[in-house]
Amino acid sequence: MIRRLTARWVVVLSFALSISLQASAQTAAGGAHPSLAHAIRELKVPPSWWNDVETRYDLNKPWKDARLEIRRRLARGDQANLREAMKLTVLYAQKKDIGDGHELPMYLFMGGEFAWAIQEYRKFLTPTINDPDKRGETHGFICLAASYQHFGEYDKSVKVCNIALKHLPEPPWTEMNAAKAYSKLGDLSAEQGKKAAAREYYEKAITNYKVAKPKYGRHLLPRRIAQVQSRLDLLVMASLRSKHLRDGEHRAQALGYSEPLTVIVTVRNGRIVNVQVKHKEKIELGATQSIPKQIVDRQDLRIDAVTGATVTSQAIVEGALNALKKAGL
């Protein structure tokens, strides 16, 4: 199990987590959630679009090459590329050339096939759930929680996060993964309007990040702490319409998947008139355009995250928050 928690684990977390691993198209500011029961009832594997998607990629190439092609297609974000990425992933899974298999449900999730992703995550995580001594699938559990969250199934999401906390990897990865699980629980509570519970979970996440000593990615921990602190700040923030902001161009940085992005907020007559994001994100699924537009349209930092790019979405909000603090927020 420890083999999954070294370099591969860090790459996956940077790529998808938060994906949030914190991925939901619905937030407290969003609308009604789709029905999970209906989605499962209507689920067909392969889906109706399967035969319409042509894959020209050479399936004789090894998975280590194919996964890079799949990620390139996911990065493009349009429906055709997302579906081809998912089909390629499934085809490699069928020929049993897909590593330990964690990327099958993850890429289905990122492609927007949430019910299918839940089905595959259940299969992938069942051995861990049934074995109290098995460790190290925190990322998978949080992704499954995010999939349930998409359907508004908060009880299931919370249950999965608590299972993740019972199956944390061995040191030196324990605290960092606990922080991620607590952070997800904070997001779930915040989305339900449970501010006291959200604050408690976020504070636990910060505490664990502060004592974490992972072999890889230790230099990113201060930024992870800043991300969670920004969510704490947002808990008590009302609409920006009532705030007195200084006019001008204000900028701040926040951590994306692996590199900082810069958010530039322009305020005129006390209102946000423009939000610009300078970044090097590889898979952002349009978040760098849609999140700034939501902030300007709503005059609010409580936005709908882009599913599959929640890390980027949250980074933009964090950067905008820090920029607005310079504007007197």
Image (tube, helix red, strand yellow):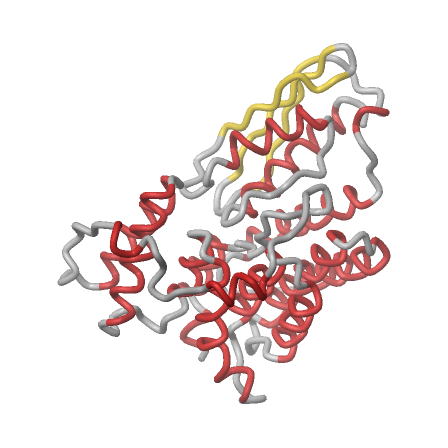
In which quadrant of the rendered view does residue 298 lie? top right
Q: Say which quadrant the C terminus sits in.
A: top right
Q: Say which quadrant the N terminus sits in.
A: bottom left
Left or right of 1 on screen, residue 54: left
Task: Say above or below: 131 vs 20.
Answer: below
Residue 183 appears anywhere in the view: yes
Q: Nearer the viewer, residue 162 or 192?
A: 192
Task: Say above or below: 2 vs 306.
Answer: below
Q: Position of residue 230 (x, y in %)?
A: 72, 43
Residue 211 appears anywhere in the view: no
- View extreme (top): residue: 269
Task: Say above or below: 27 vs 326.
Answer: below
Q: Position of residue 163 (x, y in %)?
A: 63, 77
Identity of the residue drawn at 70% across and 62% down: 185
Give the total of numbered labels.
Answer: 0
Task: Say above or below: 89 vs 273.
Answer: below
Identity of the residue drawn at 56% across and 55% down: 20
Left or right of 130 on screen, residue 319: right
Q: Nearer the viewer, residue 125 or 312?
A: 125
Q: Nearer the viewer, residue 10 or 303?
A: 303
Q: Position of residue 60 (x, y in %)?
A: 13, 63
Identity of the residue drawn at 63% across and 24% down: 251
Identity of the residue drawn at 53% across and 43% down: 256
